[in-house]
Structures are given as structure tokens and as C-alpha cells.
Amino acid sequence: MNDFTYHAPTSLDEALAALRGAEGAKLIAGGHSLLPVMKLNLAAPSDLVSLAGVPGLADISDDGDSVTVGAMCTHAQVAGSATVQGRIPALAAMADGIGDAQVRNAGTIGGSVAHNDPAADYPAACVALGATIVTDRREIGADDFFQGMFMTPLAGDEVVTAVRFPVPSRAAYAKFANPASKYAVAGVMVADGPDGVRVAVTGASGDGVFRVGEMEAALAGSFSADAVAGISVSSDGMLSDTAAGADYRAHLVTVMAKRAVEACG
Amino acid sequence: MPTVTMTVNGMERSGNVEDRTLLVDFLREHLGLTGTHVGCDTSQCGACVVHVNGTSVKSCTCLAAQADGAEVTTIEGLANGTELHPMQEAFREHHGLQCGFCTPGMVMSAVDLANRNPDPSEHEVREWLEGNLCRCTGYHNIVEAVRAGAQAMGGGS
């Protein structure tokens, strides 16, 4: 890992100033996405700006028809939150299935969405639930936020501060996990929310999270596992690695979609 | 080089380290606390688990700078002199190890579980140990040890 200059600001303004002060500066939250890629020299920031000391970024609030999760909330906090468990249990369950206990103790929702790993779980939850990514300067809908592998519309000096999830009437997430890393080989979140039924897939495609319109239409007509059982996605563009080939991943998408619908009850 | 200061096993410790220094390297190379191991270096195996402010984390995926000012507990900080911590004693009693490489991380992870859940079921122990890999034992005795250790720490019957 190349060396860098570490900054520990104690306010959002200080963090923004540090980000703007060096061309190669990156934010670090829990570091569980960023440090692994830095170890591989896939990223070599000149400066790391920690958000750990910035107050007000780790709150979870029930706003009535939505739940807002602060960007610095760890996966363990989201999984263990009575608010999230009560209002969007599928989101709490999804967070409880990320990585392992120690990963969940350190990794954050803000870091996960900003990194946009194509096998991360949160992108599927954000897209299926129709979440809004809140930054220091604007709000971005999930459909516009996840723009392909590791790609988001975030500016270099932009800070994700929270993610706002509309409360669905029902939702569930089903994942076929890599046995070592627990990253999604294929993960499907199905949500019946204010914008209708949405089906979002992570882990399978090289372009990152995507929606399956045909499944959404079928579930809008009949919300049952049988409705999606006959719908398959193309293996074109699917990831292929030692965990699963492209054809298998495409197959898993349908299987996980069925399981998610069944889990919606 | 920048200075980091943290309370490690109850004692304030400082060191001048590069900003890129990982917490596990600070503990091992600068403080000589080699009980914390590096296995995979990719936050999967759990050999490097320590507690930071009472919560178990993988110290190979944490910068020393991120733990600046924190309370850190390593495997060396569990025993009371020559008296083993109840979780360590349970690992010995139930033979929850063979080669021992994963054991420090296993014990630190297990203590965090027991602090949260004083009487974990076998299933809960196995779920919790997802991030601690053992290549020797097949986990059976480890699970027995963790359950016994949790009870010895003051859990239910």
C-alpha cells in the first residue's frame, strides 16, 4: 500500500476543506471497501480524509413514511436498529447478512454506496426500495446513483451524509453468497413500495446493480414466486469467476428472486 | 512521521508510524504484541481480530490512525496474570484448537459475542464465527468452547 496523508477532521466543513486541499484525496469511513483495494494498489490516494470524527452522521431516524440512515452507520448498527427492524425488516436482515460480524462492526452504509462494488448488498436494497442518497449538497435517487461498476455521480469533494429509504408494504432480500467473502454472487431485493414493485439484482452483472422490469411487471399482476419462476435474465454481461460462471449467475437471479418473493410472505 | 496514541490492554502506548500503517502492524511490529496474527490480510480469516472500544474488528483492515485515541484490547490483554480469561480457559478445557494460529482471533471474537449474548446457542456461535476461519479443527470443539466460555463469563445456564 502506498503511503498517504491521513486527516481526522472534526466537522463536515473541515472534511470538505481537506478533500479540496489535495487532488488525490479520498474519504474513508469504515475502510472495508477502500483499504482492500488500496492494499492491491488498485487505488492509491494521496490523502485519506476520515469521517469518523464528524458528528451527526450516524443517526437513524423514523420519518413516518421513510427511514433515514446516517452514512456512518455501520452494518451492525443498521441490523440492530429497532427502528429499521420495525419499519423495514428486510433492510435490517440484509445488513445482518453482509460479510461477517467484524466486517459489520466496521463497514458503513455510506462507504458501501459510495464505493458501489458490483457485488455489494446495499445497492440492491437502495434500488429496490427506491432510496435517495443524500449528500452535503444534493439528493440523488438510487436509479441515478449507481452508474455501473464502482461508478457514481459523486463529485470528488462530495460527501454522502445519509440514505433515505421509503417504507415498503413488504420487501425481502435473498442472496447466494460467496462462501469466503459473503459478497453476493447473486442477490435480489424485491420490494412492494410507494412506486410499485421493484426488483433489483446485485452481484451478478459486471455493470453492478440492475432492475428486472419483466419481473416487476409480473409481480405487479400477481405477487407470487410462480410469477417470476419462468422469467430469466440474459447471461450477457454477467460476471464469471471461480465462484460462478455467467450462465449460473443468470440462473441464480431467478432462484433468488423466487426466494425473495416467498420471503415477503 | 505522525504519532498515534492509544490505550492498549489498559496501558497508554504511542508510536511514530507512517499513516499507511495498519493497526495489526502497529500492534505486532511497534508494540511487540505478536499474539495478534495476520492470516489472509484480506479481512476474511479473522486471525487478526482485536477489540477497538469494546467491539471486535479485523485489525488488518484498520489503520493505526483510525484507532488513534481508542481503547484496544488484544489477546495479551485478556488473562489476569497467570490466570487465564474464562474464554481462554474454555478453549483449553474443550480443546478448541489444534495448531493455534486462528485461536487469538477466535477468542477475541468469542469474547465480543459473549458480551452481547451471554448464552449463545450452537447456531448463534456458528453464525458469529463466520469471519473466523480454522483450517484444523472442523470447528466442533471451538463451538463447544465458545458456549462454555460464554457461560463461564457469567451467562445463563
Image (tube, coloured by chain):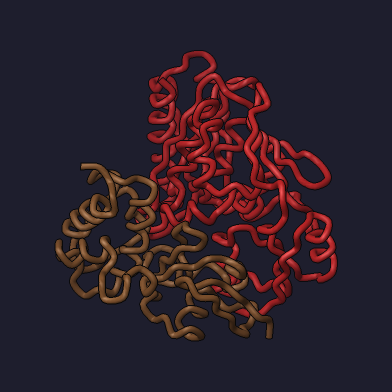
Chain colours: A red, B brown
**Which residue is depicted at the point 45% across and 63% down?**
B51
* Residue A228 percent coordinates (x, y): 44, 25
- Relative image position of residue A253 (x, y in whole percent): 44, 38
Q: Is residue A192 above or below residue A26?
A: above
Q: Position of residue B78 (x, y in %)?
A: 35, 68
Name the one closer to the observer, A17 or A256.
A17
Residue at coordinates 26% horizontally, 71% vertically from top-left?
Answer: B83
Q: Is residue A265 left or right of residue B100?
A: right
What number of labels is visible? 0
Which quadrant of the structure image shows residue B42? Answer: bottom left
Q: Is residue B27 above or below residue A226?
A: below
Instruction: Locate residue A101, reporting x and y percent.
Output: 42, 52
The N terminus of chain A - image quarter: bottom right
- Residue appearing at x 64%, y 20% in the figure: A194
Quick check: can you spot residue A236? no
Asked where in the image residue B143 lies, by quadrant, the reply is: bottom left
A96 on left or right of A54: left
Q: Residue furthest top?
A: A221
Q: Taking the image as drawn, is residue A15 in sight?
A: yes
Q: Quadrant of the C terminus of chain A?
A: top left
Which residue corresponds to the image point at 83% horizontal and 56% vertical from the top-left?
A13
